[in-house]
């Protein structure tokens, strides 16, 4: 399951982060998971609850940011919203583009007490 490996790796990263700063508790964590990342936020929340028990993230407040998909057309340079990764430019119909946002999958912030 995709979501499970994501949560597992977030926990690992958080743990080593706390270790490297000399211990403490994680008060809050902010995740950035773009709309085009293919992650189902609902199942992520569900798996999160199961996985963080007995870990350093057990009592942390979780915030998930979901940046919209955005792209810049490689042909006409129009900037447009991407609902799906394969959407074409609404102006010239070109499928070639640079994705500006929406594919994020990372820890944006860790607040350690
Ligand atoms: Zn275009």
Image: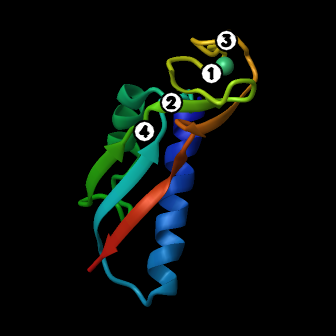
Q: Is residue 32 above or below residue 34?
A: below
Q: Are marks 1 and 2 in contact (CB under 8 Å)?
A: yes
User: Residue at 30% of width from left, 58% of height from top?
Assistant: 58
Q: Position of residue 36 (x, y in %)?
A: 55, 28
Going from N to C along the chain, the mark reached first, 1 or 3, is: 1
Q: Which residue is mark 3?
A: 92
Q: Which residue is mark 2?
A: 69
Q: CA distance from mark 4 to mark 2?
A: 7 Å
Q: Is residue 11 left or right of residue 66?
A: right
Q: Report which quarter residue 91 is drawn in.
A: top right
Q: Using a 10 Å C-alpha cutoff, classify the residue at mark 1 as few (fewer than 14 neighbours), some (14 to 19) or many (20 or more).
A: some
Q: CA distance from mark 1 to mark 4?
A: 14 Å
Q: Report which quarter residue 5 is drawn in.
A: top right
Callout 2: SS: strand
Q: Are marks 4 and 2 in contact (CB under 8 Å)?
A: yes
Q: Nearer the viewer, residue 103 or 106?
A: 103
Indicate the quadrant of ligand 1 in the picture. Answer: top right
Q: CA distance from mark 3 to mark 4?
A: 25 Å
Q: CA distance from mark 1 to mark 2?
A: 8 Å
Q: Which residue is mark 4?
A: 67
């Amino acid at each position: 399951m995709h979501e499970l490996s994501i949560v597992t790796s977030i926990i690992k990263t958080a743990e080593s982060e706390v270790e490297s700063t000399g211990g403490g508790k994680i008060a809050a964590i902010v995740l950035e998971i773009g709309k085009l990342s293919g992650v189902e936020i609902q199942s992520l929340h569900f798996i999160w609850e199961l996985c963080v028990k007995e870990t350093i993230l057990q009592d942390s407040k979780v915030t998930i940011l979901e940046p919209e998909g955005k792209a810049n057309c490689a042909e006409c340079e129009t900037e447009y919203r991407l609902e799906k990764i394969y959407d074409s430019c609404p102006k010239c119909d070109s499928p070639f583009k640079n994705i500006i946002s929406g594919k994020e999958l990372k820890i944006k912030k860790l607040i350690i007490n």
